[in-house]
Amino acid sequence: MSVETNRTTDVKHHAQTDGVKLMEGESVLENRRPSWTVWWKQIALAVVVFFGGLVGEAPLAGIVGTGLIAGYVVVSRMQSRYIVTDERIKGKIGVLSKTEMEYRIADLRSIGATQSIFERLVGHGTIEFQAGANNRLVWHGVPAYEEVKNTVREQQREYE
C-alpha cells in the first residue's frame, strides 16, 4: 500500500485522492472503483446489439449502438467510487443517473459482507454498511472487499 502526502496539509493518504472531495485533515484510506460486473446488464445489451446489427440489415447501427452503450459503461465506471477515509465512507455510482451516499464511520452499527458464486469466480464481493434501523449503504462488486471491510473495522476501533 503506497502512502501519498498532501503537501498543503501534511495529511498522509493511503490511497489515491483524485476525484475525492475531502474535509480539512481527512485522510483517504481506500479509493476503489466498482467491478465491471456491476454493469453486466449493459454489457450484455451491448453484445446483443452488436450481434443483432451484424445478423440484421443494419450493421452500422449495431456498431454505433454498441459503441454508445460501451461508452456509457466506461464513463459511468470512471465516475463511480467506493471511498473510505479516516472519518467516513462514501459511495458514488453512475453518471446519467447518479447515486451518492455517505456515513460517518462513528455512526456505523454493523458491517456485513457477502460473495455470490459469480463474485467468488471474479474475486469481488458485496459490503453492506448499516448505520441505523433503515439506513444502509450497499457496495456491489468491490475488489478486495475483505481488505476494505477490515479497513473500516480498524477505523471503527478509533471511535470506541
Image (tube, helix red, strand yellow):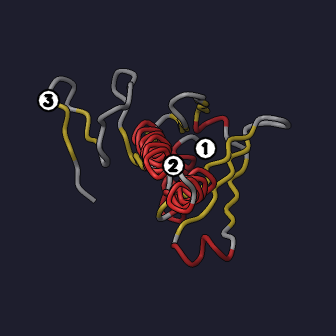
Query: If you read the primary sequence from the N terminus, does the residue marked by circle 2 or circle 3 appear first?
Result: 3
Neighbour tally class for label 2: few under 14, some 14-19, many 20 plus, Cα within 10 Å: few
Tag 3 secondary structure: loop
Q: Amino acid at mark 2?
A: Ala
Rounded to the nearest angstrom, the CA distance separating label 2 from label 3 is 55 Å
Describe residue 152's horizontal placement relative to residue 117 as left or right.
left
Please, which residue is most extreme toward the front here?
A: 57
Q: Which residue is mark 1?
A: 160
Please, which residue is most extreme toward the left here?
A: 7
Residue ID at (74%, 40%): 136
| Res. 137 in view | yes
Q: Position of residue 28 (x, y in %)?
A: 37, 40
Q: Which residue is mark 3?
A: 7
Q: Which residue is mark 2?
A: 58
Please, which residue is most extreme toward the right here?
A: 133
Dot in front, 2 or 1:
2
User: Considering the image in quadrants, where does the N terminus appear?
Assistant: bottom left
Q: Position of residue 154 (x, y in %)?
A: 51, 54
Q: Amino acid at mark 1?
A: Glu
Residue ID at (43%, 47%): 60
Describe residue 5's horizontal placement relative to residue 112 as left or right.
left
Tag 1 secondary structure: loop
Query: If you read the primary sequence from the N terminus, does the residue marked by circle 2 or circle 1 appear first?
Result: 2
Residue placed most toward the observer, 31 or 40: 40
Q: Amino acid at mark 3?
A: Arg
Rounded to the nearest angstrom, the CA distance separating label 2 from label 1 is 62 Å
